[in-house]
Image: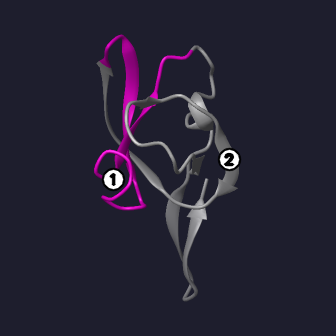
Amino acid sequence: CLCVRVAWLQGVFEGTCGTQLDHALTAVGYGSSNGHDYIVMKNSWGGGWGEQGYFRIKRGTGRPEGVCDIYRIASYPTKNNGTGWGWGA
């Protein structure tokens, strides 16, 4: 995942992100609130961050890559031969 501003606390995120991959997100749902469509993401930083470890990121922006490139940058864990875990794309 691209870095989401650590200062974000609640609401639908549609801000800017960094370029360093430093943690993982899992899409767990979607919805709408006050006219804002969003995807619910579980953050690997734990329950003390955001909305009890989750955050909502804007969807339906009209940009093919989505906010913070979430539609373009996806990865999955892979098991390396005896050397631990890595990331596939």
Residue 54 lies, in percent from the top left, at 34, 46
Q: Which residue lies under the disc numbered 1?
A: 53
Q: Amino acid at mark 2?
A: Gly
**Which region of the structure is painted magenta?**
33-61
Q: Residue 85's spot in the image, x, y percent?
A: 53, 76
Applied colour scheme: one colour
| Vertical position of residue 22 compared to residue 63: above or below | below
Give the vertical position of 44 relative to 51 (above or below): below
Q: Residue at x 56, y 37 (%)?
A: 70
Residue 37, position in %: x, y? 39, 19
63 sits left or right of 57 in the view: right
- Say which residue label 2 marks: 18
Element carrying mark 1? loop
Q: Earlier in the sequence, mark 2 or mark 1?
A: 2
59 or 81, nearer to the observer:
59
Left or right placement of residue 88 versus residue 79 in this view? right
Q: Which three-letter amino acid code belongs to the residue tagged 1? A: Gly
Relative placement, left or right, of 24 versus 64 is left
- Name which residue lies at 39% across and 26% down: 38
Residue 69, image quadrant: top right
- The image position of residue 19, as x and y in percent, is 71, 49
For the residue carrying disc 1, how many other residues have a C-alpha within 10 Å: few (<14), some (14-19), or many (20+)?
some
Taking the magenta stretch, the answer to whether it contains residue 56 is yes
CA gap, disc 2 and disc 1: 19 Å
